[in-house]
Structures are given as structure tokens and as C-alpha cells.
Amino acid sequence: MRVSRAVAWALVAVAAGATTVAAQATSGSGRRCNWDYTGERSFSAKDPVTTKYNTFLAGGVLFTCRGQDITIRADSAELYDPSGTYLLIGNVRYQEPRITIDAARATYTLIDEKLVAEQNVHARSTNGSEMRGPRAIYYRAVAGVRDVSRMDAEGRPLFTFIEVDSMGRKSDPVTLLAQRVTSIGDSLFHAGGQVEITRPDMIALADSALMNNELEFARLMRNPRIVSRGERPFNLTGRVIDLFSRDEKLERVIAVDSAHAHSDDLDLVSDTIDLRVEEEELSRAIAWGPSRALATTPERTIEADSLDIYMPGQRLRDVHAIGRAYAETIPDTLKLRSDERDWLRGDTLVASFDSVATADSSRSPPLRELFAVGNAASYYQVPSGDGPLAPPSLNYVRGTSITVAFGVGEVQTVTVHEQAAGMFLEPVADTSAARRDTTARDSTATPPDSTAPPPVKVPPPAPAPSGPPASRSPAMLPATEGGRSR
């Protein structure tokens, strides 16, 4: 089994490395703005009630925040001093050292230092991240008003995040699309309503998403789904999906409540699924919960109270099944035809795979050994020497522990340890048809003398253990105590 390395990695990239536009916009001084403004043409009118003036500017307007590197430009403006509201019209550009916001029109209110940008809003930060949408509300960080900046984007805005490493190299862009997006300071980020997070190798879908840059944590809520792209797609669903990273690298993904992980190689279902990542590759999967854990591959099924799957380098190596463990395997169809499956059960079960036997990394590693301990039992079908259409022999054993060794797609040995008991059922010849045929051929013969003694019937010898005829009835043979059965 090989699982795509893109399992939800981009979500943590957003939370850990792609700071939101509003987060980049925190003002260095955080003081209220005293605006100076100029315009090619201006007109002022005194308000008769408040005795303050309303001013109208045209021909290109420039606002400068006194003592701070903050400016606003527009084609025209209307300044309503009584309410402390500036209406900006045409090619509006609001600019701070770390953010620029363009819009067709905007409103700036002095009382709460808030900019409402509307129509073709385009916000971008100095690190290359940007937002496009129909409407955004930007709240400056101002002492005595709010400690950190905030942006509310509405009308299904599109965010694009680009991370730059210490060498100045830019990462692949990550995009976020949602009905509404809110970012607070340098850490918190929330998106709600048909959330879509996309990067070249994956897509994440949810009704809402929460990210914390400082803690390097992300959470997807309400019908979340992660879909990896590429040659080997992988899906992960659950009621809630949490992602944890360190140093901007994904380490852990947890799907909670009705969790389901699916790929071409593995279908994993449980209440909780915990995925561990090393060097951007899935290295371990843990599943547990009251409804038990079920792992299904094209060749076998493993079920238990909990499953621990080791896959270093994304190559399946070991599966530990704990608590009423049960493994079921499809027999080799080239050697026998059967509607039944071979199985092994026990309190604990360990499946070992030969992860280096297959050079092709796209193929599932072959099963090398199954080990069950604690009330162990196994049932395996042994191919007949007469070909795949002949009935197989049946091997059923019980013991304290059982080890099943596999060859090329088939069981090689079954070793029972302590308290061994069981049976080996081998098909035997069905001679009833032959007897009926003999009676029919002798029906014209002279009847025997009724006074003569009856002939003595000698039972046929027991059939040899190998190469039985195709039509047989079962015979029971005891398994060897404490040894091997085949």
C-alpha cells in the first residue's frame, strides 16, 4: 500500500506559513490617524446643526496619516465631519507598509478606524499573498481600539497564499475559497461556508475551517473531506479533522467520528483515524473506537478493537490488530476455486509484509506472516493436487498462539503453539456411482444360488493423502499436538 504524501499537507501550510492578508497588515505604531488631505478641486459646506463642515474633493485625492506611513488615494472623496466618515470613490487604494487594498469604492470611519472596501476588492501583502472578492472590511490595529488587525471578507472571496522560505524561494500557491473569511492578527484564521482549500496535490473541503498559525494547528469542521491528487489518490473524511505541524511541516492528521480513509490499496474505517507523517510521507495509521476498526485491501480484511499500521517510506510493513482481532484472506485463485476465505483470529494479531520484495512501489507488498496470540484459531484451504477445480483440503486448528507463514500467494505452514487441537479434512473418493454402475452391468447374470453363503465384503483401502479423485466425501484426521499442520 502506498498513500499519497499530500494528505492534507496544504491545510497546515496555510495555517503555519501562509499568513493571511489582514495578519500582514498590523500597523507598527498602532496610533489613531490624523488625516491630511489634498485634492485638485475642493468644496466645503457648513452643517447647520453641528456647525462642522462637509468637504467634497475631486480631480485626484491623497490622504496621508500624519506621522505614520499610511495613505489613501481615490479619484474623488466626500468627507462628512459630523459623523467622521470618508466616502472614497473611484480607483481607491489603501496602503500600509505590509498591505495594499484596491477597490472601486470604499468608506473609512474615523471612530473605529475601519475601511470598508467594495467592488473588485484586491488585497495583497508584501509576501505575495492576496485576496480578491466583492467586499472586505479591514480593521486597523489601534491602541485603545483593538490590539490586532482584522479583516472580514464576504461574498465568497478567493485567497491565495504563497510562502517564502529562508532562501527566498516561493512555495506552490495555496488557494482558499469560502463564503466568508475572517483573519485576526498574525495567528487566527477562520473560513465558513463551502470551504475549498486547493493546492496542486490536494483539495480540502468543509463547511468551516479554523487555523492557528502560532500553534501550527488547523481544524476542518462539518462534513470535512481531504482528497489528494496525483497517481495514487487518497481520501479522508470524518466529522472533524485536526492537523498538527511543527516547523511548518505536517506531523499528524486526526479524523474524529465516523472516520474513513480510502485509497486504491486500503479502505480504513473506524471512529477515529490518526495519521502520522514523516518527511511529508505517511508513515503510520492508527484506528480505534467503540465501533472497532476495519482495514480492507483487495486481498484481505483485518478487523479489531484497534489497528496500528506501520508504513515507513509509505511502504506497508506491519499491522498490529489488538482486541478480538480477525484477519480474512482470499485464497490463491490460480490454485483453488472456493467461495470461502481463509481466516485467522485471536486476542492480538500481527501481520508482517515483505516491504522490500516488490521493486514496483505502486504494488502492495506481499504478506509474509500472520501471528495470532490468545485464544487463537485458524482455517485454511489447501489446494488439491488434481488442479484448481478439485475440492481443497481443509485445515482447522486452535491453540494459545498460531503462526501462519506465506509463500508466493499461498499458505506454506501453520504452526500451533501450546494447547494445540484441530482437524485436517481431506476429500476422499465417492464410490457410490461406481457401485451403481457395476450392479447395472451384472443384472443379466445368473442369480446366485440362494443356498450358497453370502460373499465377504472387504472395505477399500484408505485413500492416499495426495492426488485424490475429483468427487469425494470428507474424512477427519486429527492435527498434531504442538507441531505443524499442512
Image (spheres, rainbow, N blue to C red):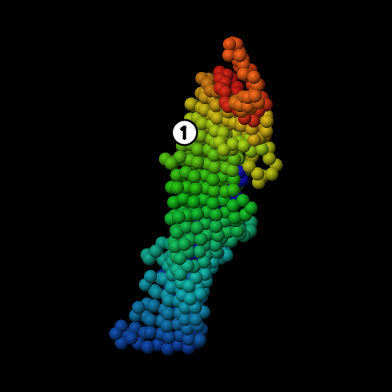
> Label 1: few (<14), some or many (≥20) within 10 Å?
some
Indicate the amino acid at tag 1.
Gly
Residue shown at 30%/83% (left/top)? 50
Question: Considering the image in quadrants, where does the C terminus appear?
Answer: top right
| Quarter residue 455 falls in | top right
Residue shown at 54%/31% (left/top)? 344
Question: Considering the image in quadrants, where does the N terminus appear?
Answer: top right
Choose between 205 and 455: the one closer to the eye: 455
Q: Position of residue 363 (x, y in %)?
A: 65, 44
Q: Is residue 171 above or below residue 478?
A: below
Q: Is residue 51 above or below residue 387?
A: below
Could you tell me if residue 349 is visible in this image? yes
Could you tell me if residue 18 is visible in this image? no
Residue shown at 52%/56% (left/top)? 204
Q: Position of residue 483 (x, y in %)?
A: 59, 20
Choose between 269 and 153: the one closer to the eye: 269
Q: Is residue 168 above or below residue 427?
A: below
Q: Position of residue 409 (x, y in %)?
A: 65, 35
Left or right, residue 223 beside residue 9: left
Q: Position of residue 298 (x, y in %)?
A: 59, 43
| Quarter residue 203 falls in | bottom right
Disc 1: which residue = 323
